[in-house]
Image: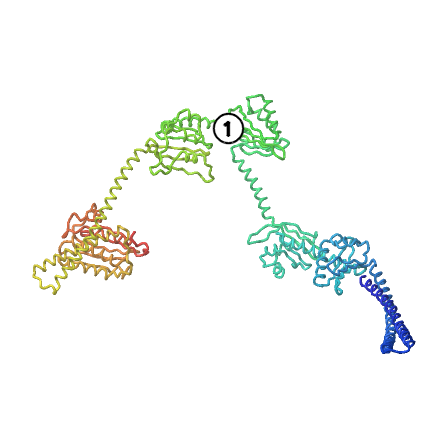
């Protein structure tokens, strides 16, 4: 329509130009005549005056030229006017044809069979044409553009998206939608130059039927996909079979149940959920009634489970699902077992239980009910009603006799009809007391519980007697005792407790709360000398009595000092039913004796430390001068210092022997001090047993020769080597051989043996001397102790102590026993499989 308006405006402009050219031509055609008239007039005027001036001649020439030019222009304008008129005639004809075409097309567009939506820019679109009313499309432009108002929401959103793609990216589209009236529209969008045109065309006939079927197919596909999503999300195994009974579809739960990687794999492999026999049973049931419904079992996750299988036939084949009812069956089975167990439990109870239905007939009873009222099984199996049982009990004289029988029966019947539980006491004629509890049942009737309180009342009487006996016992205890209940209040106490804390009898008779004792007691708990909090306090006692912990309570104990100087040991003992007992014992005398013993022990330890410090100091002070003496003695023996006479040589020998002996003693003392300090480490390595024994024997060989003592060595069963500190092992053997040489008689034999036994290596040194009495064996390992029997030389008494320390550093031990021919046998045991980290001195 805009184009038609433009064409009409162009025709008006042409007519205006034609009129303008006509008027301008008339002016040009009159111009030469006007100029000629002016020239003739001017010439006649000059001729009358009798002479023509040059200006007149020039003017006449100009007039002539002008007239010629005007004539030429007039001729050109006349021809141009004719061409313009011809063009105007042609344009008028074209305009008429265009107007006719526009009218014809406007008529076509205004037809009821289509509607155009034209977008020419960012402004509002033009709407041309109409749609039949049966499509439900609004005529108003704004209402028509609100597609969701007359289309399905999904289709409206799809159309809006397609319009956006058409206008922004010039992407054509074609779609079919169903209007609110249920008819199908074809919507096609494309671009035409700068315009975006959307055509809404109703479909009819075969095209409408095809479009309708296509929409229904899309809707059906959507429903199928929705159901597919539901089936895949369902936790129930589902399957679909073709007419040939082969699987054509399964859901995810089916694939998981058969341990398949996925649903496609399960279908391709035809992995069955049920066994062949069950599938045959399903097919038979489906062939008979069109569907199958029964319980079957299948193995899932290595566990056989029960399923309720539903399978139905259809046009395509058959479909089925399996509902896991294993838990339901388990609950049902557990319920049956619970009911059975409940009945068995009630039969074993000593409390009588009976249940009457809404018609007051006996529905259940346990054996205790029959035994309580001496009712026969034959009588109870007839399910008598409540009135019959009451009459029977009246006839045997069992019902309570403390009030009239009519009142008793009315009370029992009222309790059976009551809506709330009732509780009553029956005092039977035979002296028994029953607690009767009646509870109404939701389905009608009531349950009766008969508890025989006769024995309980007797026990309560005995308990009261026992409580009085315990009270008398507590009163004569030498310990303070107080028992507090679950609410924190005092239940009982003895006189020692009141005397200990200075409490009055009136205060205790009021059963005070445990928190009140801190402010009422006249004796308080003293703080330690360092100002810290005492180990016990009434605040802590109150917390232990009143604290509520889910974990089991444990007994606590400790001690504290009172303000009057007494020392008390306390105990917090949890009792049943949330009760707590506090006990207090006077341990003042015991703590005083303990303090005296501790002070004495501290003094002894201090003296021992002084001794050790003195020994270490003396040894370090002796080592330096001994080294000087040994060095200068060796220097005097050298040829450079000059010759020595016989006496001087003997003196130097005495000096050398004495200094060597003294240095050995000093070294032994230093070794013992190092061991005591815990800083000695063993240099572990593979020790050659034969070499070590020879080295130790060579060190004492001179002493053995001087005393005519033979040394017998037997190491054939010791092996080649073992892991130890070779230097310390040599010291151990040297000290053992030196000790044996000192006590062995002249001309006797000292025996050194080494043997492996299991995981141990034993070194034994035996002599034929006087031996050691069993009473003195332990004392021989003490430092600076010598054998009372004496020997050739009086040593420092460190040999066996050094031996014991070094062997224990290796993880072994030393024993002393008597030999078969008298004398002493010292045996050292070295473990062979001890780890190096355990061999360091501690």
**Is residue 191 found left or right of 545 in the rendered image?**
right
Quadrant of the image occupied by residue 720: bottom left
Residue 593 position, x and y percent, is: 28, 36
Q: How many marks?
A: 1
x then y, percent, for residue 675:
26, 52
The residue shown at (58%, 44%) is 331
Q: Is residue 281 visible?
A: no
Looking at the image, residue 646 lies above or below residue 489: below
Left or right relative to 443: residue 502: left
The colour scheme applied to this rendered structure is: rainbow
**Vertically, is 780 above or below 245?**
above
Category of crowding for the residue at label 1, using alpha-carbon neighbours closer than 10 angstroms: few (below 14), some (14–19), many (at least 20)? some
Comparing 251 with 371, the one in front is: 251
| Residue 359, placed above or below residue 786 | above
Q: Tell me: 200 left or right of 538.
A: right
Q: Quadrant of the N terminus?
A: bottom right
629 relative to 418, above or below: below
Q: Quadrant of residue 232?
A: bottom right
The picture places residue 336, in percent across and down from the top left corner, at 58, 42
- The answer to whether residue 61 is left or right of residue 243 is right
- Residue at (48%, 27%) from the top-left corner? 457
Q: Which residue is mark 1?
A: 453
Percent x, y of residue 200: 78, 59
> Residue 247: in sight, yes or no?
yes
């Amino acid at each position: 329509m805009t184009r038609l308006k433009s064409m009409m405006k162009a025709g008006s402009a042409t007519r205006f130009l034609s009129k303008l050219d006509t008027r301008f031509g008339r002016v040009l055609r009159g111009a030469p005549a006007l100029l000629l008239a002016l020239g003739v007039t001017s010439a006649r005027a000059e001729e009358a005056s009798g002479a023509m001036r040059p200006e007149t001649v020039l003017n006449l020439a100009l007039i002539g030229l002008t007239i010629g030019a005007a004539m030429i222009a007039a001729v050109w304008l006349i021809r141009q006017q004719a061409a313009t008129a011809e063009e105007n005639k042609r344009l008028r004809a074209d305009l008429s044809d265009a107007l006719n075409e526009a009218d014809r097309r406007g008529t076509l567009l205004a037809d009821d069979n289509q509607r155009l939506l034209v977008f020419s820019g960012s402004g509002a679109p033009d709407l041309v044409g109409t749609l039949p009313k049966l499509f439900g499309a609004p005529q108003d432009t704004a209402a028509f553009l609100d597609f969701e108002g007359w289309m399905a929401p999904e289709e409206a959103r799809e159309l809006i998206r397609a319009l956006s793609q058409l206008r922004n990216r010039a992407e054509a589209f074609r779609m079919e939608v169903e209007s609110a009236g249920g008819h199908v529209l074809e919507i096609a969008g494309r671009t035409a130059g700068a315009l975006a045109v959307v055509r809404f065309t109703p479909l009819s006939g075969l095209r409408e039927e095809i479009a309708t079927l296509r929409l229904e197919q899309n809707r059906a596909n959507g429903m199928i996909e929705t159901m597919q999503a539901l089936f895949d999300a369902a936790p129930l195994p589902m399957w679909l079979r073709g007419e040939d009974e082969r699987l054509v579809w399964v859901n995810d739960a089916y694939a998981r149940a058969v341990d398949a990687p996925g649903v496609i794999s399960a279908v391709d492999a035809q992995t069955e959920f049920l066994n062949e026999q069950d599938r045959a049973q399903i097919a038979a049931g489906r062939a008979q009634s069109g569907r199958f419904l029964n319980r079957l079992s299948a193995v899932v996750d290595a566990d056989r489970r029960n399923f309720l299988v539903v399978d139905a036939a259809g046009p395509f084949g058959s479909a089925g699902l399996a509902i896991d009812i294993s838990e339901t069956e388990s609950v049902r089975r557990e319920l049956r077992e619970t009911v059975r167990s409940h009945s068995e439990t009630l039969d074993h109870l000593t409390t009588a239980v009976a249940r009457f239905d809404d018609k007051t007939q006996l529905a259940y009873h346990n054996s205790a009910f029959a035994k309580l009222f001496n009712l026969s099984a034959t009588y109870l199996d007839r399910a008598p009603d409540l009135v019959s049982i009451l009459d029977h009990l009246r006839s045997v004289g069992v019902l309570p006799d403390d009030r009239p029988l009519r009142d008793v029966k009315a009370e029992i019947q009222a309790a059976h009809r009551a809506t709330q539980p009732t509780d009553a006491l029956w005092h039977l004629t035979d002296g028994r007391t029953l607690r009767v509890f009646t509870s109404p049942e939701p389905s009608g009737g009531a349950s009766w519980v008969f508890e025989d309180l006769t024995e309980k009342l007797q026990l309560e009487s005995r308990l009261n007697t026992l409580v009085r006996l315990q009270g008398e016992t507590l009163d004569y205890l030498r310990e303070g005792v107080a028992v507090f209940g679950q609410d924190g209040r005092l239940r009982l106490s003895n006189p020692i407790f009141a005397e200990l804390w200075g409490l009055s009898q009136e205060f205790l008779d009021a059963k005070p709360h445990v928190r009140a004792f801190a402010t009422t007691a006249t004796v308080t708990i003293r703080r330690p000398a360092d100002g810290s909090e005492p180990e016990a306090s009434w605040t802590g006692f109150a917390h232990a009595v009143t604290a509520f912990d889910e974990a089991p309570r444990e007994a606590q104990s400790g001690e504290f000092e009172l303000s009057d100087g007494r020392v008390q040991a306390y105990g917090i003992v949890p009792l049943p039913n949330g009760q707590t007992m506090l006990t207090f014992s006077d341990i003042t005398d015991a703590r005083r004796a303990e303090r005296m013993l501790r002070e004495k022990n501290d003094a002894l330890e201090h003296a021992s430390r002084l001794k050790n410090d003195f020994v270490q100091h003396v040894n370090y002070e002796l080592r330096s001068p001994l080294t000087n003496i040994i060095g200068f003695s060796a220097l005097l023996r050298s040829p450079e210092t000059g010759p020595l006479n016989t006496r001087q040589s003997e003196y130097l020998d005495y000096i050398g022997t004495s200094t060597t002996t003294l240095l050995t003693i000093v070294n032994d003392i230093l070794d013992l001090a190092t061991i005591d300090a815990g800083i000695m480490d063993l240099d572990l390595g593979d020790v050659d047993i034969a070499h070590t024994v020879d080295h130790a024997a060579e060190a004492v060989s001179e002493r053995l020769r001087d005393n005519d003592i033979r040394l017998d060595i037997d190491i054939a069963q010791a092996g080649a080597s073992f892991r130890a500190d070779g230097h310390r092992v040599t010291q151990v053997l040297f000290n053992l051989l030196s000790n044996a040489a000192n006590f062995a008689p002249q001309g006797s034999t000292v025996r050194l043996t080494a043997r492996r036994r299991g995981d141990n290596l034993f070194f034994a040194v035996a002599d034929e001397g006087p031996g050691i009495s069993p009473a003195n064996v332990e004392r021989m390992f003490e430092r600076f102790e010598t054998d009372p029997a004496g020997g050739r030389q009086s040593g420092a008494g460190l040999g066996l102590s050094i031996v014991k320390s070094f062997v224990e550093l290796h993880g072994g031990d030393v024993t002393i026993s008597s030999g078969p021919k008298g004398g002493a046998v010292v045996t050292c045991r070295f473990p062979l499989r001890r780890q190096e980290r355990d061999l360091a001195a501690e």
